[in-house]
Amino acid sequence: MVEKKSLVCIVCPLGCNVEVELSGGQIDSLTGNKCKRGRDYAISECINPVRTLTSTAKVLDGELPLVSVKSEKPLPKKLLPECIKEINKIEVQAPVHISDRLICNILGTGINIIATCNVKDKSIAKSVIS
Ligand code: SF4
């Protein structure tokens, strides 16, 4: 059975409409892309879609209770719910610095979860304010 998918390529602002025909999980035809990057994007979207994960993690003794985090590279879309559960399990001791690795090799993907902002230790933050 042939499955048809219509995608909008998001790799560049042109936003080409790409039409893909698949059968048995394999791509039979791919049209509408203007370049190889669009072809690679459409293949990834159909075979193994990936997304950069953004979320927050709990911080202990920080001036803020949470720190924003992201995956260093895009993760398989199907793993995102499990990755969010893993992030929700951790509590990071303040201070936290941008690019600190908070989870290494999440779910065996080889991809790290890193902090995307600084969170100071709350005792230091108070002494600076007073
Ligand atoms: S197919 Fe190529 S030209 Fe078209 S949106 Fe994607 S990257 Fe841009």
Image (cartoon, rainbow, N blue to C red):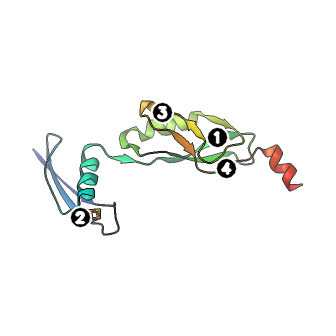
Give me the C-alpha separation between circle 4 and circle 3.
Answer: 22 Å
Q: Residues within 10 Å of mark 4 (few under 14, many from 20)?
A: some
The structure residue drawn at horizontal position 29% and vertical position 60%, both measured from the top left corner, is 9
Pair 1/4: label in front: 4
**Where is residue 47 drawn, in percent x and y?**
25, 44
Q: Quadrant of the C terminus?
A: bottom right
- Residue reaching furthest top? 108
Give me the C-alpha separation between circle 1 and circle 2.
Answer: 40 Å
Q: Earlier in the sequence, mark 1 or mark 3?
A: 1
Say which residue label 1 marks: 58
Say which residue label 3 marks: 105
The structure residue drawn at horizontal position 45% and vertical position 38%, both measured from the top left corner, is 111
Say which residue label 4 marks: 118
> Label 2 is placed on what type of residue?
Asn
Q: Nearer the viewer, residue 71 or 79?
A: 71
Q: Earlier in the sequence, mark 1 or mark 2?
A: 2
Say which residue label 2 marks: 17
Give me the C-alpha separation between circle 2 and circle 4.
Answer: 40 Å
Tell which quarter ligand 1 is in: bottom left
Label 1 secondary element: strand
Q: Earlier in the sequence, mark 2 or mark 4?
A: 2
Q: Is residue 63 left or right of residue 66?
A: right
Query: Cβ–Cβ below 8 Å for labels 2 and 3?
Result: no
> Label 4 is placed on what type of residue?
Asn
Label 2 secondary element: strand
Q: Earlier in the sequence, mark 1 or mark 4?
A: 1
**Where is residue 15 drawn, in percent x and y?**
30, 66
Pointer 1 residue Cβ closer than 8 Å to ligand 1: no
